[in-house]
Amino acid sequence: MINKGSLTFFYGSTATASPAFLKKIASERSAVLLSEHEWLSALYPGQIISLEDYLNYSSRLKPRMKTYVQHILSIGTNVVMDFPACTRQQRRWFFELATEIKAEHELMIISEQHQKPEAAPSFRPHPQMFETPDISEGLVIKVC
């Protein structure tokens, strides 16, 4: 039986970790690094202009990405995902992605030093878009 890979995802006050930090974590874990921004930019070039566009295209990507990541984890490869985990609902998606196939997971709460500078004003996350992770969500949480 093949051991499953482990899923790593992130929470931070600006919603995204710096690229250098993400690459470091992926390298340390011998993991595939997947970026929602890169996937959306490649699949929908020039089509994401507003927050509404982002929400629309992101919701199209997630079901396909879930299946894809589960396959990667199932063959024993670790995955680091640069996708938002700002709300309980978003984190639930990651939790189900991992637990449905009995893979381990870890939510890394990233300190400000490892976060990107704030997003452009039109896409700057509103404080209400953030819900602090809680142990009641069933997540394995690490602060870094």
Image: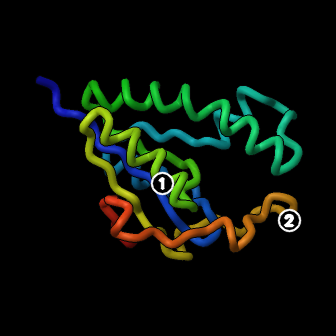
Residue placed under numbered mark 2 in the picture: 121
Q: Residue at x 69, y 71 (%)?
A: 128
The correct choice, above or below, for 41 with respect to 143 in the image is above
Left or right of residue 14: residue 143: left
Which residue, as the protein is rendered here, is positioned at the far left? 1
Q: Residue at x 56, y 61 (%)?
A: 87
Residues packed near mark 1 inside 10 Å, few (<14), some (14 to 19) or many (20 plus): many
Q: Quadrant of residue 60?
A: top right
The correct choice, above or below, for 57 with respect to 43 in the image is below
Instruction: Count every numbered label the image shows and give the total.
Output: 2
Tag in front: 2 or 1:
1
Q: Residue at x 58, y 42 (%)?
A: 35
Report the Cα–Cα distance between label 2 and label 1. 24 Å
The correct choice, above or below, for 59 with respect to 86 in the image is above
Return the x and y of residue 70 as percentages of the image width and height.
38, 30
Residue placed under numbered mark 1 in the picture: 91
Label 2 sits on a secondary structure element that is: helix
Return the x and y of residue 144 as percentages of the image width and height.
39, 71
Label 1 sits on a secondary structure element that is: helix
